[in-house]
Image: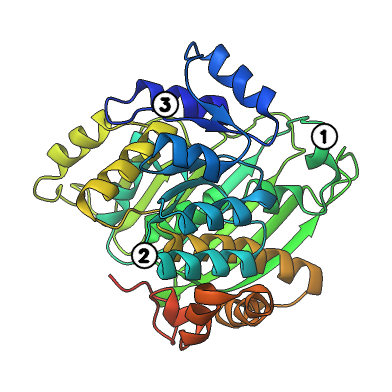
Amino acid sequence: MARAWLREILASPDTELAGVVDLVPATAEALVHRAGVQDTPTGHDLATLAAATRPDAVVDVTVPEAHLPVTLEALALGLPVLGEKPVAATLPEALRLTAASEAAGELFMVSQSRRYDRNLAAFRDRVRRLGRPGILTTEFFRAPRFGGFRETMPHPLLLDMAIHPFDTARWILDAEAVSVRCEAYNPSWSWYRGDAAATAVFEMTDGIRYVYNGSWCSGGLETSWNGAWRLSGELGSAAWDGENPPEAEFHDAGGAPPAKGEAAQEARGASNPQGVAGALAEFVHALRTGVTPTGEVHGNVLSLAMVMAAVASAQTDRRVHIELLLEEARTEALTAAAGPEAARLRAWPSASEALAVTPKGLHRAG
């Protein structure tokens, strides 16, 4: 991912590479040499390199376990951060970073690069024409043989991959998860040590249901890496195979007319940067305008909460309520936080309200 981000930073007309930090200096040096920018300053310490190069922001592409210390340090230096998913390795750490962003007054945005897909954006537009949504489903069936840490994780599918569709579901529905019932399991032929398959049913705000059914050890007739999506609404249904343009069918023969300006909006969406480049472009736009980006930490924590709630449900064989899980995470976060970060956590009336949600059902405000 570091190579992917470096490529997009160098390609963007809106960004300039100030430096590269890695705990192993030789790794940073090899990265800039491979990219053909060997004169770029490198180092093993963020504060030292930042003092020398005076950057405007930090892009954090470290492993999840390092997201907390790296982002805390960058925010303390007065630097906004664009981080790779997940926001943090645990939900308490994610809440600590949310509080730290508030205390520092700096933007922390998490890149959910799969949101920046022109066909996904078109699918979301079709969903808007179906009236009130009722059921959204994702089918995800792949058989990758990664080797390494994923094959020994307790919940490889949920912890490493499911955040993409969970975050996408929030965006498509413009709704938040209230609770989840999840079963995780491992097919008899699986080469994973942990549960490589799962089915989760989320209750979303406004009574909508989101159903995720996936497996990382199901070869043959594989879905796209984005999964296969279907939305059932009061006026009809829409489907997206994860790769090609979506389709929609309405109850009446003529279908719902396009909303005013919808065609022009879709045309603009088709020309927007995709994937990692799209996340970088939105981050730069947010820094220049002050507009809150879609991956801002307060909202993104709710995507991670869906993952952690699904894991907790699978482990305990019970329905898990997101609001309660968030409050438990805040209590745990307070045991490790200090200074302004801890003060912000204590000042929150509740974790749910701090994440800009109403107490009765986790509905995003604005």
- Report the Cα–Cα distance between label 3 and label 1: 27 Å
- The N terminus, quarter of image: top right
Left or right: residue 69 versus residue 131 is: right
- Helix or strand or loop: what does disc 2 sit on? loop
| Residue occupied by mark 3 | 8
Q: Residue at x 55, y 24 (%)?
A: 3
Q: Position of residue 168 (x, y in %)?
A: 46, 51
- Report the Cα–Cα distance between label 1 and label 2: 38 Å
Q: Determine whether 101 is above or below 3 in the image.
A: below
- Helix or strand or loop: what does disc 1 sit on? helix
Instruction: Please name whichever residue, 58 or 61, is drawn nearer the observer in this view of the structure.
Output: 58
Q: Within 10 Å of the Cα at label 2, are there few (<14), some (14-19), or many (20+) other Cα atoms? A: some
- The C terminus, quarter of image: bottom left
Q: Which mark is residue 148?
A: 1
Observer-side mark, 2 or 3, equals: 2
- Which of marks 3 and 2 precedes in the sequence? 3
Left or right: residue 74 versus residue 197 is: left
Instruction: Please name whichever residue, 137 or 164, is drawn nearer the observer in this view of the structure.
Output: 164
Q: Amino acid at mark 1?
A: Gly
Left or right: residue 80 versus residue 72 is: left
Instruction: Please name whichever residue, 134 or 170, is drawn nearer the observer in this view of the structure.
Output: 170
- Report the Cα–Cα distance between label 2 and label 3: 27 Å
Q: Position of residue 105 (x, y in %)?
A: 36, 64
